[in-house]
Image (tube, rainbow, N blue to C red):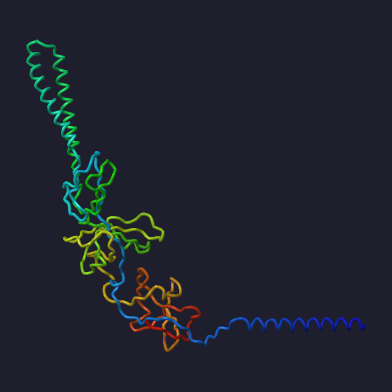
Amino acid sequence: MLKKIIYIVLALAVVAFTVYKLKTNKEITVSRVYQYDKEQAINVQAITLKLESPENDISYTGTFEPNKETRISADIQGKINSVLVDIGSTVKKGQALIQLDNSLLKLQLQTVEIQIEGLEADVKRYTILANADAIQGVQLEKTELALRSAKVQKATLAEQINKTTITAPFSGIVTAKLSEEGAFAAPGIPLLQITDISKLKFTVNIPENELNQFQINQTYSLSADVYPEISLSGKVILTGSKANVGNSFPVQFSVNNTADLKIKSGMFGKVLPIAIGMKNDQEGEHIIIPASAVVGTNIQPQVYLVKNGKAVLKNITISNRFQNKVQVSSGLTEGDVIITNGFINLFDGANVVSITN
């Protein structure tokens, strides 16, 4: 009986010690865990809303490229006697650019011309003799074949001489000079670069959900960043069939340059996704906010308003998305202050200290 009492006492002691230890461990754990104070004000960044025109925000940046550009090389080899243009020269289609040495070819041409004169005289003489049966007809035939061969040789030399003058394949500007007088030209070795910027290609990359804003053969308004006052128009000539790494698609426009060719290859510009002559549903001023300010879900987007030092969650309706901004059709009004940054630990009704931009 005594042993039974001792076992019971020991068991109760073990249970009591275990309970005490668990309670002590819980208190230690709780003391080590950070306890967020919901009354503490949260630092956030905010903006005051104002009405904006979507045209000021809906634009896509791209790059102007030349309509045509080529590096010119010689069709035949030879020494360069003269380079008739320099970098920056404006050239017309067919204008002479480089002259190769053709003195040897001209001497060969003179030799062939002398041969032709002799053969033509022989043909006349042999024709008279053949008609009088003084010579065999085969001799006349051989002379006539020799004359035809000499004329082909003359035409070949004339074409080679013609190719010693290298001309511009199209009108443009000399943008690179890759050789000088005295150098040796050969097929495949670039000598000059000609660039045509009378027409330009303008290429932008468009996210897939905004690609339907651009239609083939429609015309859109463009501008160059360095000349924003110059209004350009570009016709869509290509929409990409394959996305790039950023899941965007290239859209290319054909653009007429200004008369004085102010827009240069490599310049940056912008295009508005509103076809010229088409009705603009985005006309007027609207509430436009950064997309980063939107919380909630796609079905029910929300934003945090700042009212009386507290964050207030508000449902909104989004009517359009473009780049990194959204257009809000309901839920917000001009003058509202919305939170754009500092969402960690933020909740509806939280005290906030806002820095307004």
Q: Position of residue 331 (x, y in %)?
A: 38, 79
Q: Position of residue 300 (x, y in %)?
A: 43, 74
User: Looking at the image, is 235 positioned above or below residue 185?
Assistant: below
Q: Is residue 119 left or right of residue 254?
A: left
- In the current view of this chain or complex, which residue is farthest to the bottom? 308
Q: Position of residue 270 (x, y in %)?
A: 28, 65
Residue at image point 15% right, 28% down: 112
Query: How many numbered marks, from 0 up?
Result: 0
Q: Position of residue 271 (x, y in %)?
A: 28, 65
Q: Quadrant of residue 291?
A: bottom left
Q: Is residue 158 left or right of residue 189?
A: left
- In the current view of this chain or complex, which residue is farthest to the front? 182
Residue at image point 29% right, 64% down: 268
- In the current view of this chain or complex, which residue is farthest to the right? 1
Q: Front-most of 123 and 53?
A: 123
Q: Front-most of 187 and 66?
A: 187
* Viewport quadrant of the C terminus: bottom left
* Viewport quadrant of the N terminus: bottom right
Q: Is residue 187 left or right of residue 105?
A: right
Q: Front-most of 296 and 257?
A: 257
Q: Quadrant of residue 336?
A: bottom left
User: Looking at the image, is 236 positioned above or below residue 292?
Assistant: above
User: Looking at the image, is 33 positioned above or below residue 216?
Assistant: below
